[in-house]
């Protein structure tokens, strides 16, 4: 890792822990709740404690005036829910595009075990090589998808995060396996910082309990989109997640600290 890469990583984390809010879903799903007025959402989540936000490159002008000093990640591939196959993520930008957009890091999604795995392995390898030329950190989003693999199988998820390290990523995002005991194998499968995805939105308590379980297993944080930006109060749920990550709170403490109901 170069000095520049490490310096840029400090802009998207706090004390080694990552609370990233991806909002690239406008490409994937359209202007869904929380993304029409993305400026207000970015302001709310970064004011609530997000270390960084993540979008496609074209949204950069809407990000910078509203991120309250937080870091910025540009995502470099994508697909849509209305297209022929959502797993077929195609490149949408380059490391150079991200630099021009003022990014502190780039991210790239790879679907391990899908029929597109070969192409995406090659593409991620090329991105990490390009990024290394500029000291730009790479967040690999590595998920088991397709060919009858179980998306939360610890062995397969562990393989996915190791693949990201083998290809030169600096941080890896993946699916949570459901409990701390099984997720320990995933964290132990790589020396990279591992952050978990949020997935579809659950209750506030389910969200913070999932984060607590991941942290207990040795994770380094979260990259959580819909569970945060589609919340009725994105700032509050960000504060709750931040309390777990940055204050080591348990689920009930985190909800109380964020003035959210402590659900049964």
Image: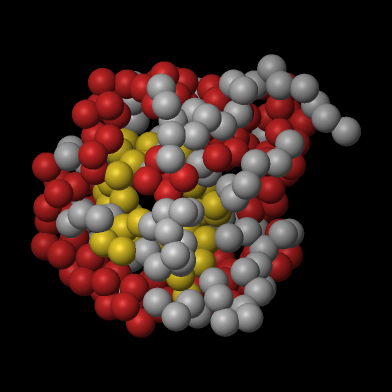
Quarter residue 158 falls in = bottom right
Could you tell me how many numbered marks the image carries? 0
Residue at x-position 55% and y-position 25%: 234
In-front residue for pair 178/24? 24
219 w.r.t. 207: above or below: below
Could you say where residue 16 lies in the image, as x and y percent from the top left?
43, 46
Can residue 16 be seen in the rendering of this structure? no
Do we see residue 75 in this rendering? yes
Q: Quadrant of the C terminus?
A: top right
Residue at horizontal 40 percent and vertical 68 percent from the top: 88
* Vertical side of 92 occupied by 123: above or below: below
- Residue extending furthest right? 264
Residue shown at the point (50%, 80%) measured from the top left: 113
Seen from the viewer's position, the closer of residues 152 and 242 is 152
Q: Quadrant of the N terminus?
A: bottom left
Q: Residue 100, how many percent across, how many down?
A: 11, 42
Q: Is residue 212 left or right of residue 230?
A: right
Viewed as shown, does residue 142 lie left or right of 258?
left
Instruction: Identify which residue, 109 or 9, lies in the foreground.
Output: 109
Question: Is 264 displayed left or right of 147 in the figure?
Answer: right
Name the residue: 54% across, 52% down. Answer: 197
- Residue 122 percent location from the top left of the image: 27, 77
Is 140 situated above or below 40? below
> In this figure, which colouring scheme has been used for the structure?
secondary structure
Q: Position of residue 145 (x, y in %)?
A: 54, 71
């Amino acid at each position: 890792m170069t000095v520049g890469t490490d310096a840029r990583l400090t802009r998207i984390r706090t004390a080694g822990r990552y609370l990233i809010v991806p909002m690239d879903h406008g490409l994937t799903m359209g202007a869904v709740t929380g993304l029409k007025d993305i400026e207000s959402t970015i302001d709310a989540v970064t004011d609530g404690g997000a270390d960084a936000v993540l979008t496609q490159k074209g949204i950069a002008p809407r990000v910078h005036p509203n991120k309250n000093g937080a870091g910025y990640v540009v995502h470099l591939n994508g697909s849509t829910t209305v297209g022929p196959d959502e797993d077929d993520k195609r490149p949408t930008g380059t490391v150079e595009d991200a630099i021009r957009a003022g990014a502190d890091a780039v991210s790239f999604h790879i679907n391990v075990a899908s029929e597109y795995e070969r192409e995406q392995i090659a593409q991620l390898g090329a991105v990490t090589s390009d990024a290394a030329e500029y000291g730009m950190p790479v967040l690999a989003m590595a998920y088991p998808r397709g060919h009858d693999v179980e998306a939360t199988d610890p062995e397969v998820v562990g393989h996915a995060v190791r693949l990201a390290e083998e290809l030169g990523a600096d941080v890896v995002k993946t699916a949570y396996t459901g409990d701390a005991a099984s997720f320990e194998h995933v964290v132990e499968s790589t020396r990279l910082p591992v952050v978990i995805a949020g997935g579809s939105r659950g209750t506030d308590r389910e969200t913070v309990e999932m984060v607590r379980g991941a942290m207990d297993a040795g994770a380094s944080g979260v990259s959580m989109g819909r569970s945060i930006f589609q919340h009725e109060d994105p700032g509050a749920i960000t504060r709750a997640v931040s309390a777990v990550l940055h204050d080591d709170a348990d689920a009930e403490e985190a909800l109380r600290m964020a003035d959210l109901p402590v659900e049964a």
